[in-house]
Image: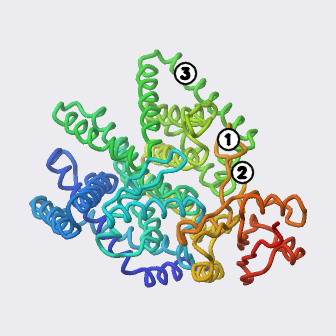
Amino acid sequence: MNPWRDGLAALADHAGDAFILFFVIAWGIFIMRGILLRFFGDLLDEADVLSLSSAGWVMPVLLLSLLYLGISFLTSVAIGVVLTLVLILIPVFFFAWRRPDPFPLFASFAVLIPAIILRFAFIRDLVLPSYFDSAQHYRLINSFIESHRTGVPVIRIEGGYFHLGFHSVIAGIAQFTGKDVIDLMLVAGPLFLAFLPFTFFFIVKRETNSLPAAILACLLAGFGFHMPAHLMNWGKYPALLGSFCMSFVLILAYLAYRNNSNLFRKAALVLLGFTLPASILIHSRTLIVYGLALIAALLTAAWDRLQMPYRIAGFIILVFLLLVEIFALQNNPALETLLGGYLKNDSWILVLVFLLAFLSAAHFTEPTFFLTAFLALCALCLFFPVPLPEIGVQTLLDRPFVQMLAFIPLSLLGGLGFAGLIRTTARLFLKSKLIQPFVIFFVFGLVLLNTSLHYDFHPSDCCRFVNRDDLAAFSWMDEFLPRDATVLIASTGLYVTAFESPQAQTGVDAGIWIQPLLSRNVELTDSNIRFDQEDSHQTLCNRGIDYIYVGSTLQSFDASQLESQPERYLPSFILPSARIYRLAGCS
C-alpha cells in the first residue's frame, strides 16, 4: 500500500469535511496568534508564535463551540448561528493588525501539506472510526446534538466518563455546518496528528538556540515513534486533542519559569489560568500530568542546588529508579505492552534517543533531569491503586495514557541531545565546515529511513472493527429488528491498569456500534462462550437475548459453534464477515 496515493484518495473522498475542520484549526491558530502577540509583543518571533499557536488553537475553538451550543440551547438555533458568525469574524478583524512573516508561514505549509497527505492514508478504507472507544465518543457527541435539537439535556455519561471537551467541539462543528459526525471524527485524527508536531518546536528552539534541533524534535514527535499516531487505532480522540493542551500548558509554564520579566511572567500565568480548565475538560488526566510536571520541576530545582558530587549521585539514583520501573513494567501482564509497543515499532529511534540523551545530559543537564524525572513519575503512577466510587480501583494514569505520553519527553530529549551533538562536533572539528552538515544530514536521514521502513500509516488489524459487510448487517438490523430487540455481542476483559477488575468488559467487534447507531439494546458476554453447550443456551434465554451478532475480528464469537446448533441459533443474516443469528428454543 502506498501512503501517498492512499492519502490523496482519502483527501478527495473527505474533501469537504477536511476543509471545514482545517478552517476551524486555522481560525484557532490565527486567534491564538493574535492573543499571544497582544500579551508578549515583540518578545516572540514569528516561528515561536506559530509553534505556540499550533499548541493553543484548541482554546478559542473549544470556547466558541461551548458558546454556540449554550446559546442555541438557551435561545434558538438561528440566534446561536448569528452570534457565532459574529464571534468568528470580529476577532479576525481585531487581530489582523500585524501581518505574519511569510517565510516561517510558507515553511510550515511546506511541511504541513505532505504530513496531511500521509496522515489521511489511515482513513482511506475506514468506514467507521477504529476500536470500541470511537463508538462511545460517537454516542456522547450525538447526546450533545440531541440536547441541542430538543432543548432537553440528554447527555448520558457512563462509567465515570466526564471529559467532554472533544465531544463538544465536534458536536458544535457538526451542528453548525450540518456535517456528519462520523465523517468529522474520521478526518479529525489525521488533521490533529499533522498539526501536533509543530508544538514541539518552541521549547527546544528556546532552550538550545538550534534550529536543526528544534526541527528534529518535531520530526521525532511526528514520525519517529508509533505514538501518538497509534491513538487513532485506539479511538483516543480526547487524548490526542489533549496533547495540544499539554504542550501549550507546559510551554506557558516554561515561559513563566525561564523569563525574568514580571510582565512576561504575568502574561503566561494569565493564559495558564484560562488554559488549565479547558485542558481538564478535554481530558481530565491532564491535571495529573500537570501535577507530575510540577513535582518534577520542584525536584529539579532542589537537585540543581546540590553540589556537583550529590548532583551526579542524584542523577544516577533517578536513572536507577527508571530502570527498576522498566523491569516492573516488563514483568506485569497488564502493563508489558507499554514497553512492547515501543520496542517493537520504535527500536531504531529508541537507540538514537538513548545515545543523544547522554549528550543532552552533558549540555542541557537541568532540562534532561526534569524530563527524566517526569517520565519516571508517570511510570510510577501505574503502580499505585486509587479506589474510586462506582468505578473501582484505578491508578492515577493508565497504561494507554502513559504509552501515549512517553513520546513527549522522548522527542524533547532527542532534540536536546541533537543540539548537544552539534555543539560537540563544532568543538571537535573546528576547521571542518562539512562535519556539521554531515551530522545533520545523517541524523535526519536515519529518522526518515526508519519512517519509510517501519512506520505504518494505515490502520492496524487489531483495532479495525467495522467493514462493509458490517454496514450491510447494520442496514438489515435497522430495517427488520424490533426496537426492543436485545442483541448479544462479543467482549473481552479490559486491562489497562495493574489493578483492573476482571469484570471490566468491552466489545471486540462491530457489534459495539449497534447501540449508538441503531438504538438497539446490546448485552456483552465473553467471546469464548461455548454456544454448543446446553447451559450457555439456557443462560442466554434467561438473559432475554433475541439475536447474536458475529463480526469479522478474530476476537469475535466462533460462528462454527452457532452453525452446529441450527435448532437453537437460526441464521437471519449471513455475509462472509458479518452474521446475525436469532436465538430459538427458549421455553
Give the label on residue 314, or none: 3
Q: Quadrant of the C terminus?
A: bottom right
Residue 303 can be seen in this image: yes
| Residue 155 locus on image (x, y percent) | 42, 55
Q: Relative to residue 492, is residue 16 depicted above or below?
A: below
Tag 1 and tag 2, C-beta contact below 8 Å: yes
Q: Which residue is mark 2?
A: 493
Label 2 vs label 3, nearer the camera: 2
Q: Quadrant of the N terminus?
A: bottom right
Measure the C-alpha gap from mark 3 to mark 1. 34 Å
Q: Amino acid at mark 1?
A: Glu
Q: Is residue 108 visible?
A: no
Residue 173 falls in which quadrant of the image?
Answer: bottom left
Task: Give the Cα distance between marks 2 and 3.
Answer: 41 Å
Q: Earlier in the sequence, mark 1 or mark 2?
A: 2
Q: Does label 2 or label 3 sit earlier along the sequence?
A: 3
Q: Amino acid at mark 3?
A: Gly
Look at 43% across and 84% down and name the residue there: 12
Q: Secondary structure at mark 2?
A: strand
Mark 3 element type: helix
For the residue carrying disc 1, how many other residues have a C-alpha within 10 Å: few (<14), some (14-19), or many (20+)? Answer: some
Q: Which residue carries the number 1 mark?
A: 500
**Where does the image place residue 561, in percent across and percent down from the top left?**
87, 71
The three-letter amino acid code for the residue at tag 2 is Gly
Dot 2 crowding, Cα within 10 Å, few <14, some 14–19, many 20+: some
